Amino acid sequence: MGFFSKILDKLGFDAGAGKVEEMLNTPIPTRAEAIAAAAARSSGAGPASPQPISEVDVVAQLEAKAAANSQKLNWRTSIVDLLKLLDIDSSLDARKELAKELGAPAELMGDSAKMNMWLHKTVLGKLAANGGNVPAELLD
């Protein structure tokens, strides 16, 4: 099981065998697309065609986990904290493996700070692209 599938599993995404690869290849929505999708959800209007998977309230789950955790973890800005909240290995080696799985540019792999920022944005973007309720401001 790859690292991204562990994240999906911990958040309750329906990502059975074969779906994870498809989810990895789903394009990340732009901020404008995320804002439009959020507006459609809140107004009850939605796309004409059904979504491939049901929506997962990522924010509610992570906020609940953060409230129950004795550590002050800021999943909104830190990939390390996000992984810790999900009880997934957050070591540098694990993050490098996740970065490779998500297709990080090679030049980021030698700079852990830049890789972490890219990882955080990409993980949240992939969650949003695959039915996760992720606010647009977290996708910048």
Image: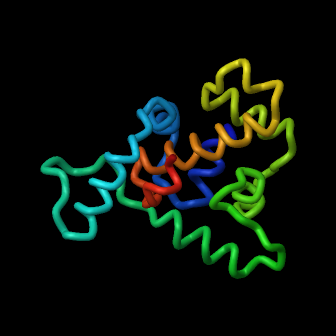
Can residue 5 be seen here? The reply is yes
Q: Quadrant of the image for the N terminus? A: top right
> From the viewer's perspective, is 59 left or right of 40?
right
> From the viewer's perspective, is 111 left or right of 44?
right
Work out which residue is located at the far left of the displayed protein and give it: 48
Q: Quadrant of residue 114?
A: top right
Q: Position of residue 18 (x, y in %)?
A: 48, 34
Taking 133 as reference, is 109 above or below it?
A: above
Q: Nearer the viewer, residue 62 or 33?
A: 33
The residue positioned 27% from the left and 70% from the top of the image is: 42
Can residue 1 be seen here? The reply is no
Colour mode?
A: rainbow
Q: Position of residue 22 (x, y in %)?
A: 44, 32
The residue positioned 77% from the left and 25% from the top of the image is: 109
Taking 24 as reference, is 31 above or below it?
A: below
Q: Position of residue 15 (x, y in %)?
A: 49, 47
The residue positioned 35% from the left and 58% from the top of the image is: 54
Q: How many marks?
A: 0
The residue positioned 77% from the left and 60% from the top of the image is: 84
Q: Quadrant of residue 106?
A: top right
> From the viewer's perspective, is 24 left or right of 114?
left
Taking 92 as reference, is 57 above or below it?
A: below
> From the viewer's perspective, is 45 left or right of 128?
left
Q: Position of residue 74 (x, y in %)?
A: 71, 65
